[in-house]
Amino acid sequence: MVTMTDTALTHARAAAERVVDPEMPMLTLADLGVLRGVDTTDDGTVVVTLTPTYSGCPALDEMRHDLRRALHDAGHERVEVRTTFSPPWSTDWISDEGRRKLAEAGVAPPDRIGPREVGGPVPLTLAPPSRLVRCPRCGAPETEETSRFGPTACTALRRCRSCAEPFEHVKEI
Amino acid sequence: MSSHHETDDENVPGTERSGADGNVYDALATADDDGRWAFGTGFDAGTAEIDAPAPEGVDREDLAAYCLMLADDALIASQRLAGWTTKAPELEEEVALANIALDLLGQARVLLSRAGHLGAAEPFRAGPWDAQRSGAGPLPQDDEDVLTYFRDDRAFRNVTLVETDLGDFGRTIAWLLVLSSWRLALMQRLTGSGDPVLAAVAGKAVKELTYHRDYAAQWVLRLGDGTEVSHVRMQAGLDAVWPFVEELFLPHAVERRLADAGVAVDPGGLRAEVDAVLDQVLPTATLTRPERPAVGLVGGRGGRDGVHTEALGTLLALMQSLARAHPEATW
């Protein structure tokens, strides 16, 4: 049986899932994996749960604002956006659709890194990073890092050795 | 910005992005928030973990003090790194240092909010800056902002390493290698904390600090094993930072008590791991581990007790003076 609440929840979810990332607007917050949940309470309040990509993500406030606005515009009067830090966001949460959209926009998507080991010291590797990042423009595998940090907290800068185009890469965490 | 995106906007009312599609004034015209305080943005009460009560059997004041220690380490380090903005040797390194500062600021904000939730901000809501204010009563700002802008140096609980002058790029990199190796070892252990906020902050911080340490280590290698000049300056930077390393491993009474309660980390236990990292990096970079006496505590008290070097005073003056002169400014 479909209840009123189910319908409202489906509607709210759809509205929240359309909101795009303020810094990488080719992605929705759902594609990016930072939209962790949309629920409704007994009194009809829509509760959206959001998680930041990085602790200091400057876009978090805008995401909250955009979510509230999108849900208000979709007819939901009472909206609460909650932020949660645990479990910590991982680039593995970027959807396949999100990866496709990133590549299409000229941003190299992150590799999948799988679950990390818990406990014990985090090893330090002094060798240069050996990860293969293909050029999102020409597909060539020969690319080099030009800057460890990029214009947003989650990207690094690279350059293609084949077509010489510079591009952003969503770095794996 | 892209045509793909504009199409989305036409079809989906309510998701239009100001700025992204040209009309940057949209956000101003449709803003539904009240005026924002000019010097901070504040987490709302909607941050899930921050509202959690202190774990059973854990002293609330101790937990607040511990959150302040870890917050202040990150906040002051972040402010120091921000001093490189517009002055770094290359644009890429400026972006890197600013990004690291931003990660640390993010860690600080959650921890300050947690300390505030446990009552740490209340003593600082009234003060001499009241004379600048038209309204009566305590400061209305969020806890994290009160703790950042309206505490005096004696109320800061950071280790002195983070407040020291960063000098040249070599010294900054030495400072960052030590700081990120130490904080990573600490945060890695803190992921198992009995306090849900500390565990959550640590879970994110481990990923960030791993990247910071990697960045610092790569630069230590490049400069230490680089030219004659870069080697000399890298070694000098390491030497300058070294006297402040000892304090990182001295446990404060609050850290001891909370470590026993399964909430905090005793920093004494971090030394072996930090040493192992330095022993891996320094010889590879052809650098010598310095043998220099530690900067001592004053009467057994150091940064964790609010006893700081003079460097903190000027840092705080830069960070706080504007907010204190205009405590009610909004935009």
Image (cartoon, coloured by chain):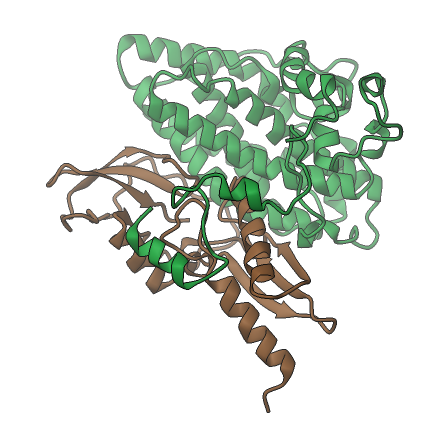
Chain colours: A brown, B green
User: x and y percent of residue B126 in the render?
Assistant: 86, 25
Residue placed farthest to the right in the image? B137
Q: Which of A90 and B296 is in front in this view?
A: A90
In the rendered image, is residue B89 in sight? yes
* Vertical relation: B177 (above or below) A115: above
Image quadrant containing the C terminus of chain B: top right
On the image, which quarter does residue B64 sit in? top right
* Vertical relation: A161 (above or below) B49: above
User: x and y percent of residue B160 in the render?
Assistant: 64, 19
Name the residue located 63 percent from the left edge and 52 percent from the top edge.
B192
User: x and y percent of residue B50 in the render?
Assistant: 71, 49
Residue placed farthest to the left in the image? A162
Residue placed farthest to the bottom in the image? A1
Name the residue located 29 percent from the left edge and 19 percent from the top edge.
B225
In the picture, measured across the screen, residue A161 lies left or right of residue A125, that is left
In the picture, measured across the screen, residue A35 lies left or right of residue A45, that is left
On the image, which quarter does residue B316 sit in? top right
In the rendered image, is residue B257 in sight? no
* Vertical relation: A83 (above or below) A15: above
Name the residue located 50 percent from the left edge and 21 percent from the top edge.
B175
In the picture, measured across the screen, residue B208 lies left or right of residue A99, that is right
Q: Which of A111 and B36 is in front in this view?
A: B36
In the picture, measured across the screen, residue B196 lies left or right of residue A37, that is right
Q: Which of B192 and B162 is in front in this view?
A: B162
On the image, which quarter does residue B159 sit in? top right
Name the residue located 48 percent from the left edge and 45 percent from the top edge.
B207
Q: Nearer the viewer, residue B159 or A98?
A: A98
User: x and y percent of residue B125 in the render?
Assistant: 83, 29
